[in-house]
Image (cartoon, helix red, strand yellow):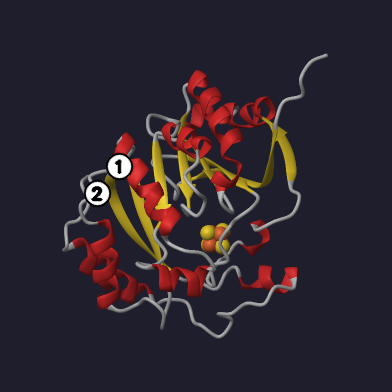
Amino acid sequence: MTKSQPTANIHSFESLATLDGKGVRYGIFFVGCPFRCVYCHNPDTWSGEGQRYTVDALAKKVVRYKPYFGKDGGVTLSGGEVLVQSAFVAAFERRMKKEGIDVALDTSGGVPVTDDVKAALRGAQMVILDLKFWDDEHYVRYCGGGIGNVLDTLDYCEKINVPVWIRTVIVPGINDKEDCIDKYADVVRGYTCVKRYQLLAFHTMGFSKYEKAGIFNPLKDTPALDRKRLEELQTYLDKKEITND
Ligand code: SF4
């Protein structure tokens, strides 16, 4: 009797995106997330049953796009929280290595750094890590979970020397002041694996997903962050020169 292959629970795909990682990317969004960030624009990825894929079936979907990836592109594994399904992710990365396809992991760092998570982090060519807040108190208040796993993830990335891009969503009235940026910089300073730190603007494009899923949206009265304000804060952060690109 042949052993059945493990499967991943996949929410959706995005062909040839350019935002999450270097070059042209194929995005795969995994179901599941331990956090409940107040500003989440993908609440439909938190739980439930998406489409089931084996490593073979998922690899087949990605390989067709290989000609478009060029020198820098590849596949970005995201979510939800991709590392909830870390054993599958590590197996999928081994398959991508055989195919010569670059893998970027886009993670919140919200899951404990188990052996499977370590294997998944080691199997990626780069990690995009969300740093949502600078301390436990704010993480618990706005994300429903602590900062501990996030810092453990960053520590492990430093240990294995995988390049990391940090990202932070800036939300009006919550973390849009210069003294907040000072605190984020204090967390990241000293990590040589951090190659880029990008601030992202809170936007309201995911609001309809809350309505559709019947989930309470705690920021329904919060406006999108003004683009000019985002640029000011990014410039303020860049002047601190805490990244090592
Ligand atoms: S970690 Fe990402 S997917 Fe999970 S709740 Fe936060 S923003 Fe949403």
The three-letter amino acid code for the residue at tag 1 is Glu
Residue underneath mark 1: 158
From the top left corner, tell me how far across and down residue 79 is, in percent.
Answer: 58, 51
Q: Left or right of 93: which side holds 189?
A: left
Q: Position of residue 194 (x, y in %)?
A: 28, 48
What residue is shown at x 41% (from left), y 83% (from top)? Answer: 173
Give yes or no for contact between labels 2 and 1 (Cβ–Cβ under 8 Å): yes
Between 224 and 115, the one nearer to me in the picture: 115
Quadrant position of the N terminus in the picture: top right
Q: Is residue 62 visible?
A: yes
Residue 22, image x, y percentages = 38, 41
- Check disc 1: other Cα within 10 Å, few if <14, some if 14-19, many if 20+: some
Amino acid type shown at disc 2:
Tyr
Report the residue marked by disc 2.
191
How far apart, in angstroms, are the residues tagged by discs 2 and 1? 6 Å
Residue occupying image coordinates x 67% and y 77%: 216
The numbered mark, 2 or 1, whose residue comes first in the sequence reads: 1
Rendered position, 129 above or below 237 = above
At x 23%, y 63%, the residue is 186
Secondary structure beneath label 1: helix
Mark 2 Cα shell of 10 Å, populated few (<14), some (14-19), many (≥20): some
At horizontal 32% and vertical 40% (from top left) the residue drawn is: 163
Q: In this view, does 181 lie above or below 46?
A: below
239 displayed left or right of 14: left
Picture quadrant of residue 26? top right
Determine whether 192 is above or below 187 in the image: above
Identify which residue, 233 or 226, lies in the foreground.
Answer: 233
Task: Answer whether residue 170 is visible to the viewer in this image.
Answer: no
The quadrant where residue 212 appears: bottom right
Q: What element carries label 2?
A: loop
- Quadrant housing the C terminus: top left
Q: In the orientation shown, which residue stands out farthest toward the right?
A: 1
